[in-house]
Image (cartoon, rainbow, N blue to C red):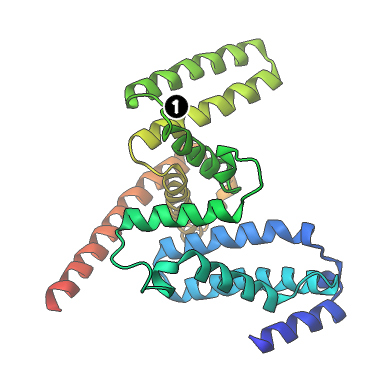
Amino acid sequence: MDQLLHIIQKLRKECPWDQAQTPQTLTRYAIEEAYEVEAAIQSGDAQHVKEELGDLLLQVVFQSQMYSEQNTFNFQDVVDAIVEKLIRRHPHVFEKEKFMHLSKEDVEKLWKDIKVKEKQGQPYQRLNEVKHGSAIVQAQEIQENTAKIGFDFPDVTGAYEKLEEELEELQTAIKNLNDEEICDEFGDCLFSLINVGRKLGVSSEMALLKTIYKFRTRFAYIEDCARLQNKNIEQMSLVEMDQLWDQAKQYLKQQKERQQAQQHGNHTNE
C-alpha cells in the first residue's frame, strides 16, 4: 500500500497526463472501473477480477492524492473514516454484549436507526436514501423505496399496463417528430420497464449487464470467424453476420453446457 501511494505521488509530479487530472476529470474512470469489476466477476476469471479490483483501488488512491494536495484529506483519512463507520454501524458485531442474538430483521432496523441518528438535524426526504449511481439502479431503488409506503401497483399486471401506455405515448411522440417529447417518453418507457422487472423480482441492472456480456461474447465470435475466413467484418453483409450470430448462439450454448457438466462432475468427485 505504501508503495502504491508513493507511485501515485511520483506520477503526479512527473507524468504530464496524471498532472493534468482533477477530481472532476477522473470521476468517469472510477465509474468505468466499477463496471469492469462487475464484468470480470461475471466472467468467472479470478485473475481478471484481481486486476480490475486493483484498477478500482487505483481510482480511490488517485482521488485521495489529489485532495491531499489541496490539504483537504489524504488516503489514511479515507481509511480511518470507513473503519470508524463500519464499527459504528455494526454494534451487534463490535459490542456483542449489548446486542445479543439479533435476527437479520433486527440488524437491518438497527442499521437504519444508526443512519437516522447520523443525519439528525437534516430535513428528511425519503428519496435521499437512494444512492447515486447508474440511472437503472436509481430507478429501481426509487421504485422499491416508494413501494414500501404503498406507492406501487398491486401486481405486475398494473406495471405492465403502464408500460404499454408509455409505449403508445412514445409512438405518438415519434409520429410528431418532437425530439424533446421523444426523449421524455423514451425515459418514461425505460422507467416503466424497470418497474415491470422489479415486480417480477428481476434486477434490471444485472439483467442488462448479462445481456451486454452475452452480446459482446457473440459479436466477438463473429469477428473471430471473419478472421478465420480472411474476411473484413466491415465488408460483410448483414445476412452473413446474422448467420454467424446464430452460430455463435449455438456454439456458446454448447460451451456453457459443457462447463456446467464439468462443474457438476467436479462436485460429484468431491
203 and 246: which is toward the camera? 203
Secondary structure at numbered mark 1: loop
Can residue 92 be spotted in the picture?
yes
Seen from this angle, which residue lies furthest left? 268
- Side of 258 relative to 173 (left or right): left
Give the residue at mark 1.
151
Q: Residues within 10 Å of mark 1 (few under 14, many from 20)?
A: few
Q: Position of residue 50 (x, y in %)?
A: 50, 75
* Vertical position of residue 108 compared to residue 261: above or below: above
Q: Position of residue 202 (x, y in %)?
A: 37, 41
Q: Amino acid at mark 1?
A: Phe
- Side of 35 relative to 90 (left or right): right
Classify the position of the N terminus by image quarter.
bottom right
Seen from this angle, which residue lies furthest front? 98
1 and 181: which is toward the camera? 1
Identified at 33% across, 22% down, the residue is 157
Identified at 60% across, 38% down, the residue is 125
Classify the position of the C terminus by image quarter.
bottom left
Identified at 46% across, 61% down, the residue is 228
